[in-house]
Amino acid sequence: MKKLVIVLICLAVVCGAGLPIANGIIMERTIKSAVEDNNNRAAKAGTGLRVKILEYDRGLFSSRIKWCIENPGGIPGSDTSQLVLVDQGTHGFFSVNSQTSLEENPWYMQWVNTHLNGKDPLSIQTRFSIEGTMGSTIHLNAFSIEDKGKKVDIHALNLDLSTGKEFRTLDAKGRWKGLSQGSEFVMGPVCFSSDLYQLTDMIWAGKNTVSLEQLKINDGKSDPIDLSGLTVNFETSASEDKKTMTMVMAFHVDRIELGDKPLSDWAATLKLKQMDTASFEQSMVMYSAMMTQAGQRLEKAGGNPGDFQKSLRDEMARNTPQLMSAFNGLLKKGLGMEITGLDIDLPEGKVTGHLDLSLKKDLDPSTLFVFAMQPDMMFSFFNLDAQFSLPYALAGGIPNLTEPLFPGMTTGFFVIQDDLLSLDMHIKEDKLFLNGNQVVLNR
């Protein structure tokens, strides 16, 4: 019996010592595999974002990992085109817990030493699980800096991030207390959350929510702005076969005060529906590639970062045929846009309305030239239903709103109803009707 107990104790000691060592080995393989998978997907998608392991020193009970996030196609001249992370990890029984530092980024440490007297406000703890998941807790201490002789207070930030296996899911939740510059500018607190999954190499689907408690601007030069209770929800979803996707953005503002005019309860929802997933991803890949190419061309030419926008426009002009091809792929049956729940309260009255516009059938961009010759033909391609109203006192003095703009119109876009300007537009049986009258364009 005593021998059995001794054997069990020895086994427990060996396992207790061996598990952290084994976890260190497993974690090295997991991290390197995840980095390789990420870079393969980035290369396939055409994005310049890369993760590179610079050093991996694995000991028996601890590891030191030095890696960087780099974008070789970033804006030339930018010192932040590479972010170096150093993790000091301790091997546990079921995970590796590490402290992450930005100390090997000269641009960051110079900023800390110059503006914060060498006191780094950032703290990052990361937990790598043997299951291949990762979780990070990020905390930013409050600090102050001088900007043009004025003190700017940056308030504390707390952020929790977690990723699934192979970084294919992302959950985030955080709260930033905001920033302020005396009473002239006050923003925050800001709360945000994300629950995302990787739909394709380039597209992430799921939900994002951002809320801003308060924004005050009063510089003494223009009318003050006081906003409170702003909430924005953004959601991307895909059909069951993942061939189409829908994006929805909804916002609500509890209160807005512009000058001495208090307003309340602004809201609207915008939906882009039935977008072709493959074509949308193609557009994203092309844009990413053009960003990379524009940066590389500018760097070779010795340009400065301020010229980047011009370089990007030139790159887009060179890729016009490819952009048109991607655009053509998006113009498929079902593609549409909706505006619902529009409700804006103004001192003059309410602005309300909705819009539902979609394609009845595939539309080739070349058909747009036919529309120029036969405008009424476009009504056979679209579904349309729109109603809007706004206070007459707000825009009643603009004649273009209430008067016909061309012979095919019986009324203007808006008609006067009591104290409102009202619009009612829809397509029925391939004909356009505006405020109860057919609009004929082929004249």
Image (tube, rainbow, N blue to C red):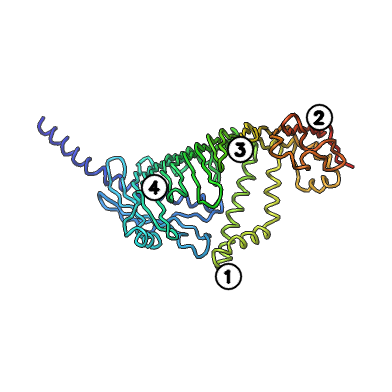
In this rendering, which labeled residue sits more in front, label 1 or label 2?
A: 2
CA neighbours of label 2 inside 10 A, class few (<14), some (14 to 19), many (20+): few
Q: Earlier in the sequence, mark 4 or mark 3?
A: 4
The residue that disc 4 covers is 155
The residue that disc 1 covers is 301
The residue that disc 3 covers is 245
Taking the image as shown, residue 56 lies to the left or right of residue 376, namely: left
Q: Secondary structure at mark 1?
A: loop
Camera-nearest residue between 253 and 65: 253
- Gap between marks 1 and 2, in whole Å? 59 Å
CA neighbours of label 4 inside 10 A, class few (<14), some (14 to 19), many (20+): some
Q: Earlier in the sequence, mark 1 or mark 4?
A: 4
- Gap between marks 2 and 4, in whole Å? 56 Å
The residue that disc 2 covers is 436
Taking the image as shown, residue 40 lies to the left or right of residue 155, namely: right
The residue depicted at 63 percent of the width and 33 percent of the height is 342
Question: Which corner quadrant holds the N terminus?
Answer: top left
Taking the image as shown, residue 71 lies to the left or right of residue 116, namely: right
In this rendering, which labeled residue sits more in front, label 3 or label 1?
A: 1
Please name the amino acid that badge 2 sits on.
Gly
- Gap between marks 1 and 4, in whole Å? 41 Å
Q: Secondary structure at mark 2?
A: loop
In this rendering, which labeled residue sits more in front, label 4 or label 3?
A: 4
- State yes or no: discs 4 and 3 in contact (Cβ < 8 Å): no
